Amino acid sequence: MVVGVLKAAVFFVVLSSGSLSAFLTRMANERLRVLEEVEKDIAVVLQCAGNIVLELSKDKHNASHLDRQLVQFQTSISRVENELGAQIRYLTQVATGQPHEGSTYSTRKDCQMSLNRAEYAKVKLGELGRTCEAMLEQQQQQI
């Protein structure tokens, strides 16, 4: 459930950021790949827990089998906690507008402002050109 929500949130972040470069697409794909690995680790955790319960329900426990399952369970649960924590921190940064490795907002805003300034300069240069042409026509008419 949590992994599904995180996948949806990553897709939303990727799609809402507009036109993405190949680099950002690769980063998003990597995040999704990591979430798929987390999903597999969750399945391993559940399987190990089931195996442990099954082994404990037997009259004679196989201690080495229990130990192996326990180690695998602990390793997988640790990976799940670490990766989900990293994903949640990333999404928190994205949602709060803090800088992060995949943020393009500031760059896009700077670019948009530059385009606005360039358009304004173009309009003003056009006005200046028309004024100069009008002045030249007046000078030529006076001659």
Image: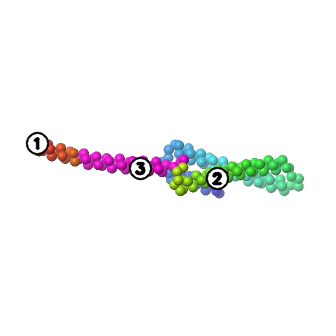
Rendered-image quadrant of the C terminus: top left
Q: Main structural element of the magenta stretch: helix, strand or loop?
A: helix
User: Which residue is the site of mark 2?
Assistant: 84
Chain-order first, disc 2 or disc 3: 2
Highlighted magenta segment, given as a residue range: 101-130
Chain-order first, disc 2 or disc 1: 2
- Name the amino acid, label 3: Gln
Q: Where is residue 121 in the image (x, y as percent from the top left)?
A: 32, 47
Marks 2/3: CA–CA distance: 35 Å
**109 and 9: which one is in front?**
109
Mark 3: secondary structure: helix
* Quadrant in the picture for residue 142: top left
Please say whether residue 15 is visible from this viewpoint: no
Label 1: few (<14), some (14–19) or many (≥20) C-alpha neighbours in 10 Å: few
Which residue is pictured at 60% across the width and 48% down the height?
32
**Residue furthest front as drawn:** 98
Which residue is pictured at 64% across the width and 52% down the height?
84
**34 and 136: which one is in front?**
136
User: Which residue is the site of mark 1?
Assistant: 143
Classify residue 111 as left or right of residue 12.
Answer: left
Label 3: few (<14), some (14–19) or many (≥20) C-alpha neighbours in 10 Å: few
Chain-order first, disc 3 or disc 1: 3
Q: How is the image coloured?
A: rainbow
Which residue is pictured at 80% across the width and 53% down the height?
52
Mark 1: secondary structure: loop
User: Which residue is the site of mark 3?
Assistant: 112
Q: Where is residue 89 in the image (x, y as percent from the top left)?
A: 60, 53
**14 and 64: which one is in front?**
64
